Amino acid sequence: DADYTLTSLRSPRHHVWSQFAMCKYSDWGMRVTAKTSFPRTGDGYKDDELDFDSWLDHFTENNQSTYYKCYHPANFQTRALTSDRRYVGSGRGGFNPNITLAMDTYNNLDFVALVEFTHESQCMLYHRLGNTAPAAAISYLSNSCHCQEEEKDTDNNRNGMIHVVHHNKGKRSTLRNLPPATLSKVEYLTSADVQIYTAALRNFIGEMAWLESALGRRVLCPDVLERWEPELAYLDGGTFNITQLYQDAVMW
């Protein structure tokens, strides 16, 4: 019954890693997995890769209903868009959700943010709220939503709002360099999520082109595209190019 319904989606590859890191390192994750066989060989960089791969094996080999009392990563986001359950972390309700139903849910939402583009999503939302936006949102839209060289305090303010850090360990800036065998397991577990996210990303880029036209300035900056282009290239069977998608949207 809400007047405005919204959610956020995340690159499935990065979402699965985030779930693993949350289970392994957050206070909540360590508490709920304490009496399970959740893989913990150590806290090092390579330890995380080994544990991540073992964690994925648990789900890819057996599609287990057991989930270490934390998260079941199989098509998590699509299940959330289709399930009538309040909580989908356990995986109850099946692992192959209806894509058509998921897209219907997505299309019926008023707004969908993308985690990889949190700042840009904020700009879009604040612009769409128009005169109903709070004063702070209007100020953010005016002062932070552009690609000109920003003053230090504005840039720091923008970056400070990007992500809430729940834990420090397990963080890494790139995932594309994980072993191919590990990444193939993620792909297997997120086949539905990839479809939804790719569609959402395409729509988002089109909306960003519209926003920039409405504002008369660029909002999705070259350095952001440069950062995410190689990380998101795994989409569309490894052929996705977000920079080209943006350029096509702007030219159109």
Image (cartoon, rainbow, N blue to C red):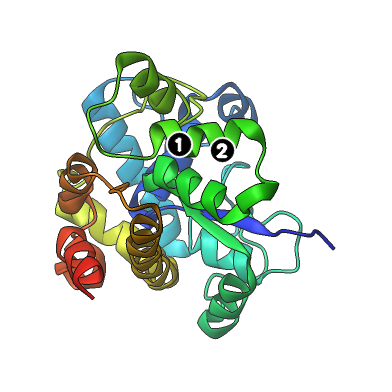
| Element under disc 2 | helix
Rendered position, 76 above or below 174: below
Tell me the tag on residue 93: none
Residue 82, above or below 227: below
Q: Nearer the viewer, residue 238 or 116?
A: 116
Residue type at mark 1? Ser
According to the picture, the residue beneath numbered tag 2 turns out to be 138
Q: Quadrant of residue 86?
A: bottom right
The residue that appears at 19% across and 71% down in the rendered structure is 251
Q: Which mark is residue 142?
A: 1
x, y (%) of residue 70? 59, 41
Quarter of the image containing the N terminus?
bottom right
Which SS class for mark 1? Answer: helix
Pick the front one: 128 or 233? 128
Q: Are marks 2 and 1 in contact (CB under 8 Å)?
A: yes
Disc 1 residue crowd, few under 14, some 14–19, many 20+, Cα 10 Å: some
Q: Quadrant of the C terminus?
A: bottom left
Residue shown at the point (31%, 63%) measured from the top left: 187
User: Which residue sits at x=37%, y=46%?
Assistant: 116
The residue shown at (32%, 46%) is 219
Q: Amino acid at mark 2?
A: Ile
Residue 22 x, y percent position in the rendering: 50, 33
